[in-house]
Image (tube, rainbow, N blue to C red):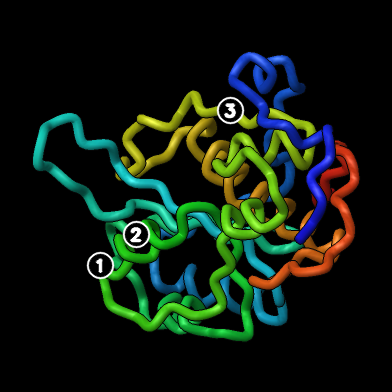
Amino acid sequence: MVNRTAEFERFDSAAINRLPICRFEGPVSVVRDKAGVLEALRELDGERLLGFDTETRPAFKKGVRHAPALLQLAGSGRVYVFQLTGMGLPDQLRALLADAARIKAGVALAHDVRELRTIADFAPAGFVELEQLARRAGLKNFGLRGLAAALLGVRISKSSRLSNWAAPQLTPEQIAYAATDAWISRELYLRFERAGCSGTEIAAAPPLPPPNSELHTPN
């Protein structure tokens, strides 16, 4: 198991709030129809690693649930935000989510995948839970915000978390929020990978280096 170092003691909210805020500054494609899905997947062809996240319209009444409104995939050069409310989960996206050769890294994946399967079923494969890697590494932060603080030394905003993700037109703030979550997931996987902690097995990996903010943002 990775040896825990002092740098990775749990970050509380106050400590996280002292860190510099970080958001994805690269290109983002918002995909609204099946033609856009095909174009996006062509552009993602060959990407072995994708940051993964979903966003769901909040329910403010007891017993009310909504299906995921957005699916975000971050590649090495661009983030794609798929608006699922109007088009469902097209076959081509389901095929990618079932492709064991394509790593999809994220946090709370079991919940996200389960909710996506209420739209259209698929056999999930290639998903890597970052929380699982963090636990095996002996870290004390497990959520996306906590991991970004502990491993990357940055703070990600949660200001848009309860907004209407099913709106036909997303605001620039919503797009930036959604893109950042998927991008940070990819960056966190790369951080683990550089320390020899990739995939689902991290036994005998070297200690993780101290946090830094050397993030890979496309020009």
Give the image location of residue 219, x and y in percent: 84, 48
At horizontal 67% and vertical 47% (from top left) the residue drawn is 184
Residue tagged by mark 1? 119
Q: CA distance from mark 2 to mark 3?
A: 23 Å
Give the image location of residue 70, x and y in percent: 40, 53
Contact (Cβ within 8 Å) of mark 2 with mark 1 = yes
Front label number (2 vs 1): 1
Assign the N terminus to one quadrant of the image.
bottom right
- The kind of residue on which mark 2 rests is Leu
Element carrying mark 1: loop
From the viewer's side, name the closer residue of 188 and 81.
188
Residue 7, numbered circle = none
At horizontal 56% and vertical 85% (from top left) the residue drawn is 100
**N-term mark: 2 or 3:** 2
Element carrying mark 2: loop
- The kind of residue on which mark 3 rests is Ser
At horizontal 48% and vertical 35% (from top left) the residue drawn is 174
Contact (Cβ within 8 Å) of mark 3 with mark 1 = no
Residue 139, quarter of picture = top right
Residue tagged by mark 2? 84
Residue tagged by mark 3? 157
Q: Is residue 217 left or right of residue 23?
A: right
Residue 30 in view here: no
Give the image location of residue 115, x and y in percent: 30, 60
**N-term mark: 3 or 1:** 1
Q: CA distance from mark 2 to mark 1?
A: 9 Å
Q: Is residue 125 left or right of residue 62?
A: right
Residue 47, quarter of picture = bottom right
Element carrying mark 3: loop
Rendered position, 38 above or below 157:
below
Rendered position, 118 above or below 54:
below
